[in-house]
Image (cartoon, rainbow, N blue to C red):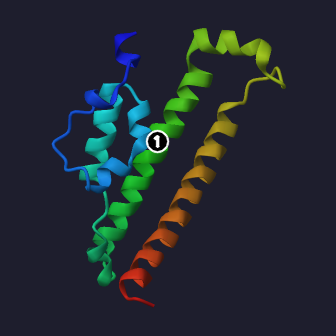
Amino acid sequence: MALLCVTRASLALDVPAHHPLFALHLTALLPPCPRYVGLALLYYYTFDIARAAVWQWDWVLFLWARNLATELLLYGSWHAFLYELPRIRAKMQHKKFNPKWPSRAQHNRDMFWTTSGFTISTVFEAVMYHLLVQRW
């Protein structure tokens, strides 16, 4: 229970109060360890928009890799939690609307279309960054 007790004083960061990191009020809702991991990821994997001034594949692939890692981390762990863990699966059985569990083929299809959607959104994000820097 001590990890769930989060106070403003427990956010011990050496960041001035006017820094944009303090705009992340949702991180105050997280326990300390995930909060610090989230802040570290935000700091190290935030895209430098000045790189979008010139269209190059290195920053576009960086965006795609970041989005793909986010997809795998969030959706992959949620799928594993709901469908792969036997104890959770047994607890969820009576709550399912359809008592049949999806097949592996359906999971593969869902992975393909989710990854396609993330790729399309990455292209859109890259184009928008490029146009924003060009002041178009």
Residue type at mark 1?
Answer: Leu
Residue pictured at 51% horizontal, 62% vertical: 119
Above or below, 114 against 84 in this view is below
Q: Position of residue 38 (x, y in %)?
A: 34, 40
Residue pictured at 31% horizontal, 69% vertical: 59
Above or below, 94 against 123 in this view is above
* Farthest residue, direction left: 14
Front residue of 35/121: it is 35
Residue 40 lies left or right of residue 77; in this view the side is left
Which class describes the residues within 10 Å of circle 1: few (<14), some (14-19), or many (20+)? some
Q: Quadrant of residue 46?
A: bottom left
Q: Position of residue 18 (x, y in %)?
A: 26, 56
Residue 67 lies left or right of residue 2; in this view the side is right
Q: For mark 1, what is the residue? A: 72
Residue pictured at 62% horizontal, 23% vertical: 83
Q: Position of residue 57 (x, y in %)?
A: 32, 74
* Farthest residue, direction bottom: 136
Above or below, 118 against 35 in this view is below
Q: Position of residue 65 (x, y in %)?
A: 37, 55
Above or below, 98 against 49 in this view is above
Q: Quadrant of residue 130?
A: bottom left
Residue pictured at 45% horizontal, 91% vertical: 136
Element marked by disc 1: helix
Residue 20 lies left or right of residue 109; in this view the side is left
The N terminus appears in which quarter of the rendering?
Answer: top left
How many badges with numbers are in the image? Answer: 1
Residue 95 lies left or right of residue 15; in this view the side is right
